[in-house]
Amino acid sequence: MDVFKKTQSLLVPTSSSHPSVDPLPTVVPNVPIYTQAGETGRKTLWVVFVIMFISTIIFAALSYRVPVQKRLFHILTTLITTFAAISYFAMASGDGHASAFIGSHKHYDYYRQVFYARYIDWTLTTPLLLLDLAFLAGLSGANIFVAIIADIIMIITGLFAAFGKTEGQKWGYYTIACIAYLVVVYILAVSGRRNAVNRDAKVGTFFTSLALFTFVLWTIYPIVWGLGEGAQVIGVDAEIVSYAILDVLAKPVFGFWLLITHQRLLAT
């Protein structure tokens, strides 16, 4: 009888104030990790803004020293540094950037700060730089049109590459941008140089030097992109400093060299 009661107690449900429940499987959400500009990067952006702003004022002042019909290069150069100053002010003040997804690893999502304001700047300023070189060389309208379209394709696909979600997207857009850049180089290095030399020996020499200077700088840009936004080898601060040096050389320095030397050529 005792055995029956013990067996029966095992078959009858009993209440408990602390029921035993197996733990539910947990899903750990990925933690976002952001790579962003630090103190060095932010200070660099402000410094370059000041350089671009002062250069704009100087270029505008220089334009009033020449007749209106000879101000084309002054206007183009002033617009270049104006757009650059606005871009750098946006980036330095905290605007003009977004986070691009890099990848995931062990419950972490990695993001990198991308300054899209820089690409807007380049879309506006690099065609103006090309116009400076094209007008100096006396390129035909068709060559100028093709060079500018290739240049815009180069910048836009670079922006797409920066926000590419897969390696195929990123490096695919990067390749398209490099091909477009080669088109620009070909038009200016071949047709541009031939036209400049045919116009005048001194103009040809000056164009060759200025174009070579520009193309060396423009070739370094995709290298910085590949090390920064592309392969993530360098940080955001190093990327900002690298682009800052290139932008100062490619815009204010280019502008002063162009205006001063062109004025001397006109005087002779």
Image (cartoon, rainbow, N blue to C red):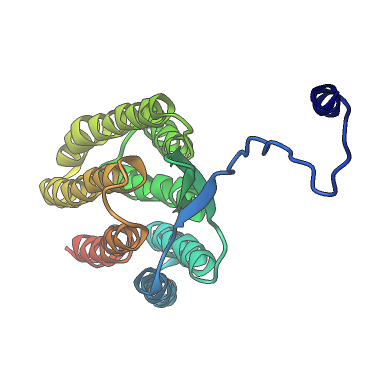
Q: Which residue appears at 48% of the width and 49% of the height?
A: 124
Q: Position of residue 107 (x, y in %)?
A: 49, 42
Residue 230 vertical placement versus 261 (above, below): above
Q: Can residue 108 be seen in this view?
A: yes
Residue that protrudes farthest toward the front in the picture: 1
Quarter containing the C terminus: bottom left
Position of 261 with respect to 86 (left or right) is: left
* Residue at 52%, 65% in the rendered image: 86
- Report whether 84 appears left or right of 234: right
Quarter occupied by residue 257: bottom left
Task: Tell me where residue 26 sits by quadrant.
Answer: top right
Give whichever of 236, 56 is nearer the camera: 236
How many marks the image carries: the answer is: 0
Observer-nearest residue: 252 or 193?
252
Q: Position of residue 174 (x, y in %)?
A: 35, 32
Q: Which residue is drawn at 63% across and 35% down?
A: 25
Query: How far across and how far down the image is residue 103, in percent?
Result: 44, 38
- For the N terminus, the quadrant is top right
Which residue occupies the foreground of this view, 156 or 141? 156
Quadrant of the rendered structure where residue 130 is? top left
At which x and y percent is residue 74?
Answer: 39, 63
Q: Can residue 115 be seen in this view?
A: no
